[in-house]
Image (cartoon, helix red, strand yellow):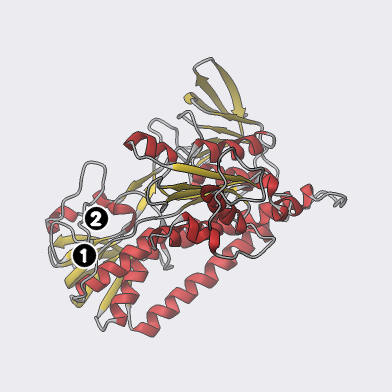
Amino acid sequence: MTNKPPMETDIAVLGAGPGGYTAAFRAADLGRKVVLIDASPQLGGVCLNVGCIPSKALLHTAKAILDARALEGVRFAAPEIDLAAVRAGKDGIVARLTRGIAALARQRGVTVLQGYGRFASANTLQVQSTAGTQELRFASAIIACGSAPVRIAGLPEDPRIVDSTGALELADIPPRLLIVGGGIIGLEMAAIYHALGSRVTVVERLPQLIPGADPDLVAILAKTIAARYESIRTSTEMQFLEAGAAGLRVRLVWPAGSVEQTYDRMLVAVGRRPNGGRIDAQKAGVQVDERGFIRVDERQRTNVPHILAIGDVVGEPMLAHKASHEAKIAAEVICGHDVKFDARAIPSVAYTDPEIAWMGLTEVEARRRGIAYEKAAFPWQASGRALASGAANGLSKLLVDPSSRRILGAGIVGSCAGDLIAEAVLALELDAEAGDIALAIHAHPTFAETLAFCAEIAEGTITDLAPAAGSAKGVR
């Protein structure tokens, strides 16, 4: 039952994460009346409140600790960790950004409803909150309901077993931490807790950490963190867990054997599941598959044309920047613009130490699809900037079409990889050839010039490495 007068709006946006608030703001800028709905009292969704931003704040702290330890010829006393202050610093950054988004909503005249929204029909949402139930009638809607962490079936309800949200609360620093899941989220949390003092073990069910990235990039990260962490095990599964007073007793099993260990805390980071099944989309006629995904066309429309969807709920990759891009498309489509999703590359970044970033075609995908490519890789041991910065354990690579010489993909492992990958994304979007990057003058000494060196390798004009037999070209 509703207990408030119905509201009406042009566009209802369900979910206030990076995709949701971007869609709401773009639609408002285009002159539409918009209502933005989210269950959290703070705008920003998972990314801002319990994901991307707080984790990066803590990763910054972790990197400062690790960099101080690695400085040659300079010795610092062991860091004193004021956990309350670290936590407060992280929370302060989140609060500042959430206040900023709320201010932007007010400036644009976007109405914000706090509550859990579910469809009641193809033109009606019911928004439930502690204050009651609000009926919202809309002409169009954008679903931006995101995703939630996957739980492992059968695990006991125990405060020592947490997901990424719980880990980011930073309640304490456990002496021994087990991280189940060697993907991006698990490895970022491993970096944080290791730097703050935990002995970290990472287990991954698949044969490789960060399964979506190319093995040559991951191998450099794996070698680096293997020297830091207590244990890293791939092709490993957790067979049983017993929660006792002394800790979490776990049996880990891999093809060559098994081991039983006791940990003080366990972080489950085995992926995320879309929230499509939690919003009663079927009452609006919107089709949701068995995994919770909502399929959309190139204009972000669902099977119900006036209801669009964006972000994690429409499919991989589950990344904030993809959601924001889709958000603008959805808002513009509703407002009558002739636009569609046509991104050729969506970069992925693991903010580990060293960072890993990639975009476009990977070598694994190229081999699987039978796509011909040439690989040009530049080791950071030959980079003056990398050597001077203590970051020589890096690698940059470009994948190039053998015929057209256009950029197909790129991968970087090393300091600032997440920032460096932007040049490669732009090159692919502009149909650039390797020679275009090679002929663009890059500042020296920088990490960015490693991509130019890759392009020079592809063109046969590299002078910063010994020439490969028959690789030199006489004309630039």
User: Does 260 appear above or below 73?
Assistant: above
Judge from the rendering whether residue 308 lies leftward or rightward of residue 92; answer left or right.
Answer: left
Please identify the quadrant where the N terminus is shown: bottom left
Measured Cα–Cα span from mark 2 to mark 1: 10 Å
User: Does 233 appear above or below 70?
Assistant: above
Query: What x and y, as percent, mark residue 304?
Result: 13, 60
x 52%, y 28%: residue: 234
User: Does 409 appear above or below 215?
Assistant: below
Query: What x and y, as percent, mark residue 227?
Result: 69, 34
Q: Which mark is residue 227?
A: none
Q: Secondary structure at mark 1?
A: strand
Query: What x and y, as percent, mark residue 330?
Result: 26, 67
**Crowding near the residue tagged with mark 1, few <14, some 14–19, many ≥20 C-alpha atoms within 10 Å:** many
Residue 433 in which image quadrant: bottom left
Answer whether residue 15 is visible to the viewer in this image.
no
Residue topped by disc 1: 126
Q: Which mark is residue 279?
A: 2
Under mark 2, the amino acid is Ile
